[in-house]
């Protein structure tokens, strides 16, 4: 019971902090006046793709890959089974923006304006305190990467993918688009054609990194696209925690973010991928994220989708070896006028594999939170297990959430279960709590933190605070916070 | 607490049309009236439920005007409503809920967390709820009777000055009703006033009100004592309507 008490005390302190906190969303919605040193201009066609490849002085195989991906992109129809994507303005989007010509290993060498942006966002400070390594990307290119020497000495590689293509071509070629081929979906194909930046992280056999490594993505331009491609390889018996954060200013014209993330968790490895997405409300966020999980390996996805106009994201784990396991935790916040179509996929391909999916969504006003999941148990995935839990929190009386789980079970010995809960911060709930002396603010914070309670251990505390602040902010805009 | 010529509407419909009522410390009042008379509306208006709009009149407590106060200000002034149908608050544990509420209402009491929880557990047991309720979500998955008992637990813990009990007896079996009545009697003192809302007699057998009021069509149209409630028990409300 003692443990329980200290947790409650922590909760009390957190509530105190929340009352005092005053940071506003505008704090990261600022934008710079930086002019890119190179841009392909608007629109997409063969010559734009060739131009990108040319600027990057890429090997021929990559150039051919891009052109092939472009063909696939052009031939694939838009997905119509999900949110409305008609607002994506393909013709007026800028597909490649090079902010500067540096790829620096020291913040001192990063151009002032870019450095200031990252400093405002707290990136260098975070790197110093918590991280084993850090990559920073501004629009289309990585501008900074650094890895602590102890890890470099152990053979760990951490840099932007463009640099990796040049410095470690064979290694990259081994993994590039194997888990996510360009044929996978229209947005993956688009990424294949115009990809730029993203990180390459390779952890050699048996190397276990106890501090996380982070990449921070900043999209500054209006009506631009960010198409990074990230590859994380945890070789046999290794352990790694990779974190991504991203923000963008709010513009009148929409931007597009369409990333690929591929994770390869080899035999006996443990890989954890955490991302906190805080795009502004003028961003369509359409990434494809997938992990191949081999024998005895553990994959963990932890995701927070706070911002963007529309997000479609279903991190997938392909459990390819015996005893492979995946844990997928996703928290989505659908603010007014936004759509979060998020979920997870677990594909069980081997015996004794297990998956656990926890999806939590919060919808505010007409914000739409949708859980869309796929669970597949192939024949031969004997005694595999899966559990899916979907919790929704509705912030207004008119808020709604939807769940579309999809199960394909071909193995009779496999077991699986679904659970769902719906909580609310409606008028009645608030009136009840306030009638006991709590302020509206405190009441809603308690409901939000209560909603996140069972995943508190797995998400960074700052994230919970951030989430709560955003909800308060949105509610404040609606005039409901007294 | 003094209610003067109070009128209020919900969703644009006028429900209370000039209610006068005075409840002082030490007194027990019963508010009776047929279904739909506006009894629960009065309770909700008194605690400042945002769906209910006061269109006239005033509410004062200890000389303080609460007519336009927020629900939390009213709670801090000492008002408490045991709801007719308490809502579930999914995810908020009883322990942290009561702790936060207690801190707001009694900021000077520096009672330790552990001691506080022991106090709550004791109250839970006294109304026949298991102490494991402490870590359950507020009213989430509770039966009707459990919700009513928990309202009483909150009264005992939060120590209000004016207690409004809205149909506290509904959903309670005989034994539970007895426990709840015991608690009410235990809590009753010179400094606490009760307004017991009920549309029939059951609870009034255990707790004898000194004052009985009848609310009908949005007004208190009769004031009396237990003879009035006895007559209602026998004849229903017809004789008042007829009069
Ligand atoms: N939230 C509400 N929305 C709409 N009508 C309401 C609401 N609350 C009460 N009413 C209406 O007010 C009238 C009085 O209801 P109520 O106060 O619950 O009566 P009682 O408690 O005396 O049975 C009824 O006609 C009821 O339908
Ligand atoms: Mg009623």
Image: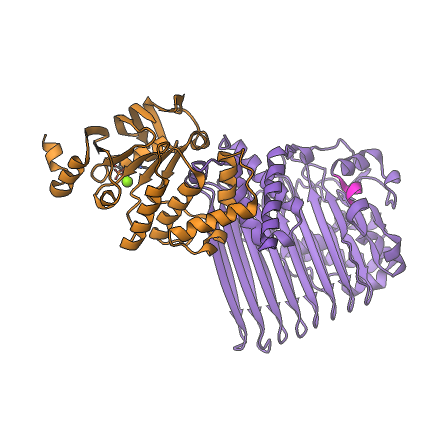
Q: Nearer the viewer, residue B170 or A38?
A: B170
Residue B91 visible in the displayed image:
no
B158 sits to left or right of A38: left
Residue A342 included in the magenta stretch of the image: no
Q: How is the image coloured?
A: by chain
A317 sits to left or right of A193: left
In the rendered structure, the colour chosen for chain A is: purple
Q: Position of residue A479 (x, y in %)?
A: 50, 30
Give the quarter the ligand 2 occupies: top left
Instruction: Determine the residue positioned at 51% across, 53% down.
Output: A391
Q: Position of residue B1 (x, y in %)?
A: 34, 27
Q: Position of residue A231 (x, y in %)?
A: 75, 58
**Figure check: A17 above or below A311:** above
What is the chief secondary structure element of the magenta stretch?
A: helix
Magenta part of the chain: A122-126
Residue A133 visible in the displayed image:
yes
Instruction: Determine the residue positioned at 70% across, 44% down.
Output: A246
In the rendered structure, the colour chosen for chain B is: orange
Instruction: Tell me the quarter of the image containing the C terminus of chain B.
Output: top left
How many numbered marks have been drawn onto this rendered protein structure? 0
Q: Position of residue A414 (x, y in %)?
A: 54, 74
Instruction: Determine the residue positioned at 53% across, 49% down.
Output: A451
B44 sits to left or right of B119: left
A155 sits to left or right of A220: right
Q: Nearer the viewer, residue A42 or A334?
A: A334
Q: Nearer the viewer, residue A237 or B155?
A: B155
Instruction: Determine the residue positioned at 70% across, 53% down.
Output: A191
């Amino acid at each position: 019971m003692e443990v329980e008490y200290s947790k409650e005390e922590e909760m009390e302190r957190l509530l105190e902090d929340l009352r005092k906190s005053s940071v506003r969303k505008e704090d990261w919605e600022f934008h710079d006046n930086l002019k890119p040193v190179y841009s392909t201009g608007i629109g997409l066609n063969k010559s734009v793709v060739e131009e990108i490849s040319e600027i990057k002085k890429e090997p021929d195989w990559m150039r051919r890959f891009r052109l092939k991906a472009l063909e696939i992109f052009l031939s694939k129809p838009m997905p119509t089974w999900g949110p409305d994507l008609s607002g994506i303005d393909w013709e007026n989007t800028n597909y490649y923006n090079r902010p500067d010509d540096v790829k620096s290993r020291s913040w001192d060498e990063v151009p002032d304006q870019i450095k200031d942006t990252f400093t405002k966002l707290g990136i260098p400070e975070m790197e110093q305190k918590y991280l084993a390594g850090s990559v920073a990307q501004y629009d289309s290119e990585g501008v900074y990467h650094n890895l602590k020497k102890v890890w470099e000495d152990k053979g760990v590689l951490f840099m932007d993918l463009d640099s990796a293509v040049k410095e470690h071509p064979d290694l990259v070629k081994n993994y590039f688009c194997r888990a996510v081929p360009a044929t996978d979906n229209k947005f993956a194909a688009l990424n294949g054609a115009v990809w730029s930046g993203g990180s390459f992280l390779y952890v050699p056999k048996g190397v276990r990194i106890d501090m996380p490594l982070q990449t921070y993505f900043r999209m500054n331009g209006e009506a631009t696209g960010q198409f990074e491609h990230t590859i994380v390889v945890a070789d046999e018996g290794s352990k790694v925690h990779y974190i991504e954060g991203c923000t963008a200013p709010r513009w009148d014209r929409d931007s597009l973010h369409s990333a690929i993330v591929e994770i390869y968790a080899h035999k006996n490895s443990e890989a954890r991928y955490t991302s906190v997405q805080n795009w502004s409300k003028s961003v369509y966020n359409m990434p494809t994220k997938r992990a191949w999980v081999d024998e005895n390996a553990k994959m963990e996805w932890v995701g927070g989708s706070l911002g963007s106009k529309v997000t479609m994201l279903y991190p997938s784990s392909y459990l390819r070896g015996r005893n492979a396991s995946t844990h997928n935790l996703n928290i989505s916040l659908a603010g007014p006028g936004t759509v979060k179509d998020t979920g997870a996929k677990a594909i069980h391909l081997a015996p004794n594999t297990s998956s656990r999916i926890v999806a939590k969504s919060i919808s505010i006003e007409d914000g739409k939170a949708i859980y869309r999941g796929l669970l597949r148990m192939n024949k031969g995935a004997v005694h595999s297990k899966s559990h899916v839990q979907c919790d929704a929190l509705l912030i207004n009386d008119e808020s709604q959430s939807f769940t579309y789980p999809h199960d394909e079970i071909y193995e009779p010995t496999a077991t699986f279960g679904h659970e769902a809960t719906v909580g609310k911060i409606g008028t009645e709930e608030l009136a009840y709590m306030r009638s006991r002396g709590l302020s509206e603010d405190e009441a809603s914070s308690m409901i939000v933190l209560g909603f996140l309670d069972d995943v508190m251990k797995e998400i960074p505390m700052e994230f919970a605070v951030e989430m709560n602040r955003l909800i308060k902010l949105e509610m404040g805009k609606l005039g409901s916070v007294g | 607490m003094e209610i003067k010529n109070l009128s209020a509407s919900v969703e644009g419909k006028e429900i209370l049309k000039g209610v006068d009522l005075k409840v002082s410390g030490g007194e027990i009042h019963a508010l009776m009236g047929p279904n739909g008379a506006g009894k629960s509306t009065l309770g909700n208006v008194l605690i400042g439920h945002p769906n209910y709009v006061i269109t006239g009149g005033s509410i004062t407590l200890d000389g303080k005007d609460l007519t336009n106060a927020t629900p939390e200000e009213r709670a801090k002034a000492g008002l408490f409503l045991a709801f007719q149908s308490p809502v579930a608050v999914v995810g908020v544990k009883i322990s942290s809920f009561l702790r936060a509420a207690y801190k707001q209402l009694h900021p000077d009491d520096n009672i330790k967390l552990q001691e506080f929880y022991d106090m709550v557990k004791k109250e839970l047991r006294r109304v026949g709820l298991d102490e494991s309720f402490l870590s359950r979500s507020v009213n989430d998955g509770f039966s009707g009777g459990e919700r009513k008992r928990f309202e009483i637990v909150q009264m005992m813990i939060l120590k209000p000055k004016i207690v409004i009990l809205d149909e506290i007896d509904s959903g309670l079996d005989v034994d539970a009703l007895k426990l709840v009545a015991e608690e009410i009697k235990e809590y009753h003192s010179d400094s606490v006033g009760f307004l017991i809302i009920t549309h029939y007699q059951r609870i009034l057998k255990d707790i004898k009100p000194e004052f009985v009021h009848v609310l009908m069509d949005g007004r208190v149209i009769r004031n009396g004592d237990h003879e009035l409630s006895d007559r209602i028990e026998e004849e229903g409300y017809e004789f008042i309507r007829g009069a």
